[in-house]
Amino acid sequence: MKLKLTFIFAFACMAIAGFSQITLTAADVAIAGQSMTQVNDTLPDASIVAGTGGQNKIWDFSALHDHEVYSFSIVAPNATPYAAMFPTANVAAIENDSAYAYFEKDNNGLRMLGIYGSFPVEDGNIELAVRSTPASSILRFPTTFNDGYTESYKRVFEMSGVDAGFPVDSFKVVSTVQRSVQYDAYGSLTTPAGTFQVLRVKETEVSTDTSYILFLGAWTELPGDQITDIAYNFWTKQNGVSFPIASIQADENGNTVSATYLRDFAVSPTYEDKQDIAFDVFPNPCSDQLSLDLPDGFDGTVAVYDMVSRELISQNIAGHFATLDTHALQQGHYIAVLKNNKNRIVGYKKFEVSR
């Protein structure tokens, strides 16, 4: 049994062209307040291929189609119902308001702890819990071209016997995973959403699955096969925020099996029929006070998050101008996330506290 569960992140930005090497850090990735729409192409065109690694590459994925649509958002773990199951998490992701992924993020990397929630299948939905021991790396920082790493971990899938399609009490799959990651290419990538500078991350997982069924109080072991999965994730970095703009799943022969891309990575939802709200923060860097220049008549809140997605300030604001007391914030980078009176994200600004 093999389940592909992918949570990826995005935020508001515009496409850019040209070539450059991209370096990713903790300050760029998985910021609370990000939201996006990801689409999956289950029958990719023959032109959708990863190709070889290297510098100044050009990929044209403009033939991708929208077969399955998923919405994602990045939040603080305490804003989710299952945070107690993953007490060390400091970042969480929500998929379609029904499934939750939990991560650890620090200056060394972004790591997945596990997933819990309801996932769609052909006959409906299944309740599924997934844990990684130790946490599996999404990225290690700094992420730069021609670098990489290897790691080993166990991934455990658990569900009820009914959801698994067996007349048993419970069903569990333990995957022993050997994972190799290479930051093997950079260049220009085109999707239906635009053209982007990207850093490609090639991930190869060799997993050995062992299944267990619980029936009448006894576990029975069912050894499985060894499976090799290859994924290519294409990360972009714009306006100080990084996210994967596209991803390819390939077989051992390099044939593309499925592909995803970000269809909508603007701030969402809209405010007064606009895609985002233009506002300014100043001074930037600031010391003990940050001022916000807002649209006339704005009514909502502003929340300040640090780079590991902890909410540090939340303040109601109304009108054209507002100030935040930042004297208690340590020196460093932060995100000011603007929300309307329906608690919907409508904009963000990155700022720095310096003394």
Image: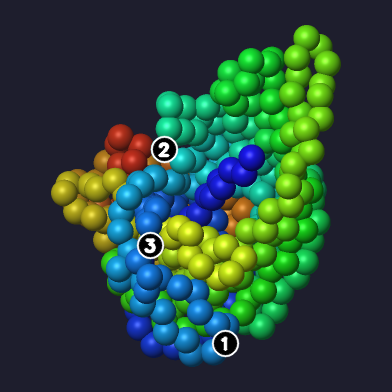
Report the residue at 30% width, 68% height from top. 63
Mark 3 and mark 2: Cα distance apart in space: 23 Å
Camera-side residue of 246 and 331: 246
Q: Residue at x 64, y 26 (%)?
A: 159
The answer to which quarter of the image holds residue 279 is bottom left
Secondary structure at badge 3 equals: loop
Mark 2: which amino acid?
A: Asn
Disc 3/disc 1 C-alpha distance (Å): 23 Å
Q: Nearer the viewer, mark 1 or mark 2?
A: 1
The residue nearer to you, when weighing 329 against 169, is: 169
Q: Earlier in the sequence, mark 3 or mark 2?
A: 3
Q: Can see residue 87?
A: no
Q: Residues within 10 Å of mark 1 (few under 14, many from 20)?
A: some
Q: Amino acid at mark 3?
A: Pro
Q: Residue 153: give x, y in percent of width and height.
A: 79, 51
Name which residue lies at 72% across and 58% down: 206
Q: Earlier in the sequence, mark 1 or mark 2?
A: 1
38 in relation to 99, above or below:
below
Q: CA distance from mark 1 to mark 2?
A: 36 Å
Please give the residue where the numbered disc 3 appears in the rendered image: 44
Q: Badge 2 is on which residue?
A: 96
